[in-house]
Image (cartoon, rainbow, N blue to C red):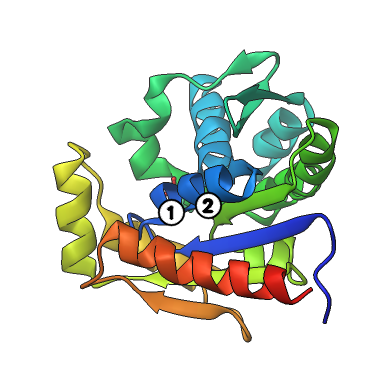
Amino acid sequence: MPVPNFIIIAIDGGAASGKSSSSKILAERFNLLHVDTGSFYRHITCELLRRGVPHTDLTALKAALADLRFDTRLNGRSAQMLIGGQPASSEIRGQSVNDHVSHYAAIPEVRHTLLGYQRGQVEVARAHGFRGLVMEGRDIGSVIFPRAEFRFFLNADPAERARRRAKEGGQDSISERDRLDSSRKASPLTCPAGAIEIDSTSLTLDQVVEQMTSVVATRLAMS
Ligand code: DC
């Protein structure tokens, strides 16, 4: 099938599987907008925690979600989500958000709130003259862009991922988040049929990116 002028690359995978590092490099290589949807879930979580809305109170949650106004601004090649005009703070990588984000992300109303916003990044990318976008998350190749030109699923041994996260200085119970993200009913973390799965346990970041680059460049050269 010929590749259109505007391309979408979906990269899914568990926590600390290398999605962010690889998608940022691909964005640079192919002139793409980089969209980290995990940061969107983290920003919403932070905002709901700030407002004191627990994930267990669906009525309060729905009211709070209806009140959120989303915009996008660019930070280099990356899309930054603004809530009520405010960018996310460093708190989105902190312990409290790490502990709560999977609980909020499991709620269909939260996912639904972000669905249109995430798909709308195509217009953001076009408006800024990008050749396409690379979006990372858990359900990009399965739900957000199931017909993306390229869909990758990154995997790595949990112990190796925990080691990588610790090296970044992060305190994150990645196995617990993966368990919650994979077992939820709404858009669970899963390798969608037809996606290219890469196990990065014994690969360097460069090797992972080379595999992806080769898939993309080969198909682009053919069309
Ligand atoms: O990529 P990350 O670890 O920063 O993501 C934080 C959380 O957000 C993750 O534990 C699950 C949720 N998430 C999701 O449910 N769907 C996405 N597309 C992206 C993230």
Q: Position of residue 97 (x, y in %)?
A: 39, 35
Three-letter residue code for mark 1: Ser
Q: Residue at x 50, y 20 (%)?
A: 50
Q: Badge 1, how many Cα within 10 Å: few under 14, some, many 20+?
A: many
- Write the residue at 55% across / 53% down: 136
Q: Residue 43, image x and y in percent?
A: 54, 31
- Residue 162 position (above or below residue 159): above
Residue 37 position within the rendered picture, expressed as x and y whole percent measured from the top left: 58, 46
The circle on residue 26 is 2
Report whether residue 105 is seen.
Answer: yes
According to the picture, the residue beneath numbered tag 1 turns out to be 22
Q: Is residue 110 left or right of residue 131?
A: left
Q: Are marks 2 and 1 in contact (CB under 8 Å)?
A: yes
Name the secondary structure under disc 2.
helix
62 relative to 102 in the view: left or right: right
Between 97 and 129, the one nearer to me in the picture: 129
Residue in the image at 75% along x and 58% along y: 7
In the picture, measured across the screen, residue 105 lies left or right of residue 173, that is right
Front-most of residues 181 and 78: 78
